[in-house]
Each structure stands twice: as structure tokens, then as C-alpha cells.
Amino acid sequence: MDYLEKLNNKQREAAMHTEGPLLILAGAGSGKTSTMTHRMAYMIDEKGISPYNILAVTFTNKAAKEMRDRVEALVGQGMNMWILTFHSACLRILRSHGEILGYGRDFAVYDPTDQKTLIKNIIRELNIDGKRYTPAYFLGNISKCKEKKISPNDYAKIFGDDIKEKVIQQVYELYEKKLKSNNAMDFDDLLLNAVRLFERDEAVLLKYQNRFRYIMVDEYQDTNQLQYQFVKMLAQEHNNICVVGDDDQCIYQWRGADIRNILEFERDFKDTMVVKLEQNYRSTSTILDAAHSVICHNRGRKEKKLWTEAEEGKKIIYNRADDEKEEAYFIAGEINRMRSSDRQYSDFAVLYRMNSQSRNFEEALSRRGIPYRVLGGLRYYDRKEIKDIMCYMRLVQNKADDLALIRVINEPKRGIGGKTVEKLQALANVRGENLFDTLMDREVVDSLSVKACSNIKEFTEVITSYSNEKENLKVSDIYDGLLVKSGYLKALEDQNALEAESRIENLMEFKSVIYDYEKEDSNISLGEFMERIALMADIDNHDADENAVVLMTLHSAKGLEFPFVFIPGMEDGLFPGWRAFDREDGLEEERRLCYVGITRAKERLWLTGAEVRTMYGKTDYTRESQFLHELDKRLIEGDGIYEKKSKADRLAEGSFLDGMIEKTAYKPFDQLKYARMETKKKVQSYGTDFALGEAVSHPKFGAGKVTEMTGKTITVSFDEGEKKLALGIAPLKKV
């Protein structure tokens, strides 16, 4: 098979360069994923390079899966090849060697919500003024420290006795101690500890250098200093590193991305070959010319210009409305007008600079009866009920996870108040043990109220039972069992309230998530499942098949594309934001964000703004965005820059306010009720009344025969051998 047949000349040149450093400057929509995957196929089948010796890293699970699927389609499945996100790759390495840094192999991974909870606990413990110092303030500083490899001790030396910095240092120090005692890492730790591991143990570093003789990095312009060090250390032995990126799309400097990594790659790796992918396969030439007319004003960039063989396309439409509500109605009207039998709602995207802009668009779309989905707002996995049940699952996986335990010890209510938890935590700290071990001490538990004592014993028994059985159970069985036996589902049902019904609906929907993972991998373990959920990014939740208008921030839109794109809020102070004017590199990053937004559009692009805008309760007249003035005016139609049609003129051309209909949404509670009944029925069907020699079945191990029964334990002989299982927990059924 000629793996290079479908590539253009520049893509083919990049794919065939396999030895030595390679920098691929891949413009938006230039086929970089195709180039990378065909390059890997060429290396494996044509150059005889073992998949075992190739490492490919990117930033999202979605991108990694797409890349993996494409490579397997070319060279076949069953490759022993790492195509992972940075965090997943580091996590896999740390799972094997974490003990060198003092971690157990079952360490937990704390997501941002977990981190915030832990910081809140620390603020209370240190009696810090929570109004003056917010969790986000501490977490932002801690993240910056970890990225720069500054430890709490280093922080104290750098900033000395400054009162404000001393508070940060105290919180940082206690935060690190609690992470370690909980056998947990945050996302920054995954990168930092992987680098520390390589620095501390040369043998481990050499092992992975010799394994990964060929390294490929996607979206290199988004790497931070830790990611840069990670790949540089791995590549320094064989120097076969290929990075793919676009400096014009570096839009994450605010969260650590260092554009110097791609701009100075040729300095870091001598004799680098540079290939520019400038042919675009996504957008019309009008859209590409518009994007270039804006981005060319940036000084800190490598010279390149996208081009296409596609048609010129229609001009960009610009509309400057009276206010933000009229702006939203205009966009809803345009979507309603453009949608036809061969156009889905999912073909349309509204990309805004700030999350707070979404409210007006949600209202306008609802009035039109247009389905929409907000991507990048409150994540599904950040909802209270989902976080609660995930903490139950985390405890089953790792009983030393104090943070998870504290969250659910009184969910549902078990008579364990905050003060009782603080006392138990203090006792655990004095003993030098985790909180779960303290709860397993019957003398301690017996000292609590009768109700609390009984409930805690039941709680620890459920967690212990499922923890002991986790290797013998499917993730869905663990989930259903915890939902029922913890009393969480019943507590919500007893509330008999609309909010409780909504929470139950989310819990039932979470079963779909688990089933989807089990379909991909029938043997997925609880630990693997929890890792995948913890590492999931917002963009991974985007379902391109859902027929709804997508509302999302410009930052979240990177990597996606839509036939029709609206970019609202084209006003100085909003886009670009006022802070961007404080420094030149700030304005350049905003301009790159504008470039990213424009190049998301395949066929049509709308730019909108408001003459008067109300934000945070304050109403002001606005000034049209600087980026509008930089855009080639020959490419725009509609309202002229600084020229405003009267409202009467626009209404005379055809009102976009006509035909608005209020629609009432409803939830399919009958279907939800059925799902709840099925969950309880499934758990309650697990038998406890068996006889010696009786034939039974298990969903994971198949058919078997009972050989022994002791108390709450049953021994069953399956084809693969004997298994000791917990009665009432194991999904055993009589044949």
C-alpha cells in the first residue's frame, strides 16, 4: 500500500522525513492529522520501525483516539504503540514507577473540582480569610509554581517574609502534604512528577529513551515548560523528534503555553528540517484571506499564508446591532433563515470570547425553538450528584483518598456533621493514618451517636465489600451497587422534588457513559475507567452527531470546524479584551484567538457586535473591535465599519424578530423511572441463597458451580479457576 499516495507534495515531504528533528508548521485545516498518521504508517510498514518504538502525544483524548483509529485503519490493529495525551502518557509511566517518588500504584488523580475542595479545607484549617484569599487564587499560584518546578521550600526562599507570599507558601506546603498523604496527584503533578522521575532515576529515563526512539508531538505551540522538558528529555538520546503545530494558533499562554517552544525549536534541535503545510482543505478563499489579513499584524510569528483550491465563497457578513439582545436575536434569525432540509442545526456554531455572553444566545434560540448545546460551561462531570458517586467509586479504588471520603461520608445524611468529621480527621492526623482506617476502628466509631455509629459501619462495609470485589466486577456492576447500597438513590427519590428528579436523571445518564466505555473495552477496570473520566477535557464531550446549535467559547472551539460560524462581541474591551491592551503580547494572543475563530468556518462567517452592551450590570456604548479594522474590507458585506444602518432600515429589509414562539421543555420522567427501577432490580437480583454444587452464572466469568460457602463468602469453580466472591455483591444468578 502506498501510504503517501493521497498526500500533497509538502505533506509527503514531511511524512518521508523520519530521521532527525522535524518541525511541521501546519496551518489551520491543512491536513496535519492525516500527515502525522500517514507518517506513522510509512515508518512502520515502509521503514520497518517497530510501533513499540514510537510515541505520539497530543492534548485531548478525542485527538488521540482519532489519531489511533486512523493509524490502525492504515496498518492494522494490535499495535503496541503509545498514542496518548501528555497527561495519559505521564500517568502510565508513573503507574509503573511512582514508588520511586513515594507513591502507591493506585494513587488518585485529582481534577480541578477536587483541588478546589482540598484548598477550601486547608483555608479553614489554617484559619485564612476566605473572602480575601479565594481557592482559585491559591490554585493559580500553586499551578504556576509546579510548572516552574518551584517547591514550597523554594517558594519560601524566593519570596522571604512577605506576608501575602507567606500565606501562599503555607497553603502550598499543606496542599502538597495532603496530596501525598491521600496518595493523590493533581494534573500538574502528572507532568511534574514524570519529569522528576526522569531526573531522579537515569535508568528509568534510559529505559524510555531506548523504547521511544521516535517521538511525535501534536499541537506543539500549546506545550508548557514541563511538557517541553518531558519530550526533550525523551528525545535527547536519539534526536528523532517531530513536532507539529501552528504558532498562529497559540491561544493558551494564559494557562502556561509557551509560544517560544515552537518559535525556538530550530535553536533547541540542531539541523532541524522545516516543512510548511499551507494548503487549506477546510475553508473558502474568502475566509482564509480574512484570517490572514488579521493575523499578519502579529510580529511574533513565522511567515506563512494559507491558500486553497476551493471556490472563493461568499463574503463575510458583519452586523452591528443596537444592543446585545438584538445581536442575539439577529444570530437566531440567521440560523433560522439558513437552516434547510439539507442543513442541520449542528452545522451552526456561535463562538464567543467569554462564557457570560452565552445567556442571551440561549434565550434567543429558545424563543425561536432552536435546539442548542452549551459546550464548555458547567461540565456534566462537575455536577454535584456525579461528583458524589464518582467519589464513592474513587473510595472503592483507593480507600486512602480522604478527600473523596469527606465528600460522601454524609451523602446521604448519616448524622456525621462537619465538626464530627473534623475531630475524626484530627485523630487520623495524630495517628498518621488515613480517615477510612480511623473509621474502621470500632472503638472510635462506637464513641459516636447510635445513628452515626450504625450508619458509618454500614458505609464502611459497603466500600470494603466493593473494594475487595473490584477485580471481579464490571464497572457498571460497581456503579449500580454503590448507587443502591449506599442509599444515595433512595435519598433522592425520598425528596420527591423536581431538582431531585433532575439529579437522578443525570445519575442514570452516567450509566450510559460507563456502558460506552465497556463496549470499547469489556475488561476495563474501575481504575482505568476513573482515569479516563478524570483526564477527560471539555472538547471530548462534543458530540458532532447531536443536532443542535453549538454555543462555546473561542478557546474551546480550537480543533473543531463548522460550516457556519458566528463570532459575536466584536468590540474593543470584549474582543479583544481590555487587558490585552496592557501589553503587546496580550494583543497578539487575542489576535491569534480571532484567527482561530475565523478559520473554524468552512462556508460562511458572520461577525457581530452591539452599539450598546450591558455587562455585570453596567451599560456602555462600545467601540468596534480593532480586528474589524484590520480585516480586508473587500471581504465584508452588511454593516460598514463605523457605519450604522438605522433600525427602521433594517426592519424594512425584513425583521428577524418575527415568528418567535415560546416553547416549554419537558423531561421524559417515565423513561427515567424505568431506568431507576431497572437499576434497583439488577442489584437486588444478586442472589444470596445458594447451595453446594448448584450451577450459577457470572457476567464476567461465565458458568460455574458452587464449591464452598463461608459466612458472606461463596467460592465458585469457573472454567478459568476458582473465585471467592462476596454474597449480595457479586452479580451471581442461579442457572
Image (tube, helix red, strand yellow):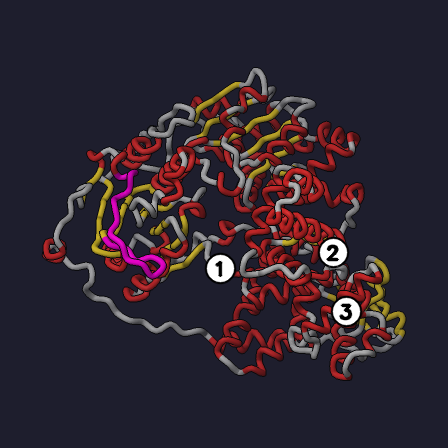
The quarter of the image holding the C terminus is bottom right
Few, some or many residues within 10 Å of mark 1 (<14, 14–19, 20+): few
| Mark carried by residue 424 | 3
Cα separation, mark 3 vs mark 1, equals 33 Å
Identity of the residue drawn at 56% across and 15% down: 271
Cα separation, mark 1 vs mark 2, equals 27 Å
| Mark carried by residue 504 | none
Q: Which residues are magenta?
A: 612-628
Q: Secondary structure at mark 3?
A: helix
Amino acid type, residue under disc 3 in the picture = Leu
Q: Secondary structure at mark 1?
A: loop
- The mark that comes first in sequence, 3 or 1, is 1
The quarter of the image holding the N terminus is top right
Q: Could you say where residue 11 lies in the image, as x and y percent from the top left?
A: 46, 26
Identify residue for label 2. 182
Identity of the residue drawn at 51% across and 29% down: 260
Identify residue for label 1. 378
Q: Quadrant of residue 734?
A: bottom right
Instruction: Say whether marks 1 and 2 touch (CB < 8 Å).
Output: no
- The mark that comes first in sequence, 3 or 2, is 2
Few, some or many residues within 10 Å of mark 2 (<14, 14–19, 20+): many
Identity of the residue drawn at 70% across and 79% down: 415
In reply to whether residue 186 is colored magenta, the answer given is no
Q: Could you say where residue 342 lies in the image, as x and y percent from the top left?
A: 30, 53
